[in-house]
Amino acid sequence: MKRKALVLVLAVGLLAARAFAADSTKQASPDDCMDHAQTQADMADCANKGGNAAADRELNEVYRKVLAAHAKDAAFIAKLKTAQRAWVAFRDAELEARFPARDKQAEYGSSYSMCADGALESMTRQRIKELRAWLEPVAEGEVCAGSYNKGD
């Protein structure tokens, strides 16, 4: 009886330690999260929370900064909003073209969500670079700068 109780206590302790470790990896960097991922579901969760979700937050932050920096230019704001909606449609269509199967899990397997999140993160990081062009100063005399930041 004592042996069964000891085994039960040890098992509960191990489960608690594993749960604590799993929670701590969710708070770590994306690379740390992947280093500790033990299943495909863990890796997909890391890809989403660490990379794609972080990139999406950064994209929204940069987009708001561009809108604020150019708030006085109504024509620019309207056209940027149109461009951003078009980019979102492009991003989604691009992902569908890359993974065109109707039943994505059956066709691409358990790694699909991780791969899709990685692709979304990559496209989002590229869009962030594109949006930052409206926040960074342009060299004096740059004739092709258009609406990019001229330091006004």
Image (cartoon, grey):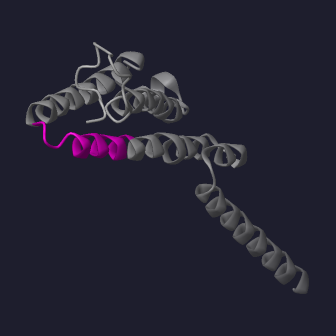
Task: List x then y, in percent, for residue 95.
Answer: 37, 23
> At x 27% / y 30%, what residue is drawn?
88
Horizontal side of 34 relative to 74 (left or right) equals: right
Whether the magenta-drawn stretch holds residue 104 is answered as no
- Residue 27 to residue 150: above or below: below
> Residue 94, located in which quarter of the rendered image?
top left
Q: Nearer the viewer, residue 14 or 93?
A: 93
> At x 80% / y 79%, what residue is drawn?
9
- Residue 59 to residue 10: above or below: above
Instruction: Give, as a single range, the part of the protein colored magenta.
Output: 59-73
Whether the magenta-drawn stretch holds residue 67 is answered as yes
Horizontal side of 55 relative to 29 (left or right) equals: left
From this viewpoint, which residue is outermost toward the bottom? 2
Q: Nearer the viewer, residue 46 or 144?
A: 144
Task: List x then y, in percent, for residue 25.
Answer: 65, 56
Task: List x then y, in percent, for residue 84.
Answer: 23, 31
> Residue 70, located in which quarter of the rendered image?
top left
Split into 4 quadrants, where in the image is the N terminus?
A: bottom right
> At x 47% / y 22%, what residue is drawn?
107
